[in-house]
Amino acid sequence: MKFLDLPPLQRLNAFLKNVDVGDHILQGDLEAYSCKLAGLDKKLSKSLDHEVQTGSSPLELSASPVGPLAESSSRKTLIYLILTLNHIYPDYDFSLLRAHHFQKEHGISKAEEAIDSHLLEVSKVWAQTPGLGENPFLECLWSSIDEAINLNECDVYCYKSDLETDPFGEQASVWSFNYFFYNKKMKRILYFSCRAISKQAADEATESSSKYDKYNSDTDDDESDRYGMANEMDV
């Protein structure tokens, strides 16, 4: 998988990196990847293909969210989704994900509606930001995505987070979404994720972490003092 630095997505990514919408901070990410495999990706792809083919149930081999896993094209789709997540979140390992961890959307419009409903407040911030608000945010968003991936040719998948072993389950997270727009003709995937972080929960988590760090520091100081006193007594 190769990251594609596409101009239509650059301005949107810069804006979505950290958007203050009142009680929440929204963090978004738009990344496009070529599905051409090389190096470690190619090696992992072969391993995953074998594991999926031999480890899937008869039902999954005949039907799954990415298609019948008995077919190589369906297994490739699953592998591309997994590899995309591995590239975007290198601190996590998604190689154990399987087809049931994903869901295929019934058309582009359903994904658009879900995404638009989450980004209404973001649209207001965009409109009030100098140099950005000439055109509506959602109009810019979808025209840029379409330019990057050609939406009419895409299948759309979403990742069903387990909220425990991936980056979307942090305590301060209020909601999140993760969509993959996969264009087989272009051999390209565009990944779009957003999550809303509660300011209050994030502040509380930071405060709790600070108290924990202070406790550890005080404990270390006490142990150091006791160690020093013991040395003096020995002398």
Image: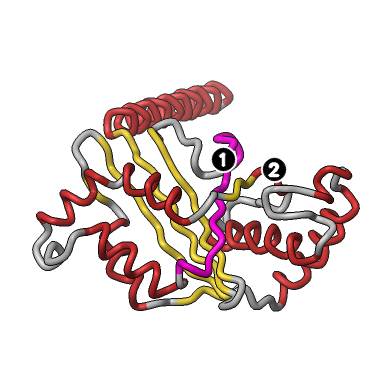
Q: Check disc 2 and give the amino acid type.
A: His
Q: Nearer the viewer, residue 44 or 156?
A: 156
Do labels 2 and 1 touch, CB within 8 Å? no
Residue at 42 percent of width and 27 percent of height: 212
Whether 35 is drawn above or below 133: the answer is below
Task: Please state which of the two labelled residues, at mark 2 or mark 1, is closer to the viewer.
Answer: 2
The quadrant holding residue 23 is top left
Q: Nearer the viewer, residue 66 or 160?
A: 66
Q: Nearer the viewer, residue 24 or 132?
A: 132
Across and down, in percent, residue 110 comes to: 45, 48
- Judged left or right of residue 221, residue 23 is left
Residue at 28 percent of width and 52 percent of height: 18
Q: Is 162 a magenta residue?
A: yes
Mark 2 lies on residue: 100
Q: Quadrant of the C terminus?
A: top right
Q: CA distance from mark 2 to mark 1?
A: 11 Å
Q: Check disc 1 and give the amino acid type.
A: Ser
Q: Which mark is residue 111?
A: none
Across and down, in percent, residue 223 comes to: 50, 25
Across and down, in percent, residue 199 comes to: 27, 34
- Judged left or right of residue 98, residue 220 is left
Mark 2 surroundings within 10 Å by alpha-carbon count, few (fewer than 14), some (14 through 19), many (20 or more): few
Dot 1 falls on a residue whose secondary structure is: loop
Q: Which mark is residue 161?
A: 1
- Judged left or right of residue 86, residue 21 is left
Residue at 63 percent of width and 47 percent of height: 102
Write down the region rendered in magenta. 151-165
Whether 143 is drawn above or below 98: the answer is below
Specify the color scheme.
secondary structure
Across and down, in percent, residue 168 comes to: 49, 41
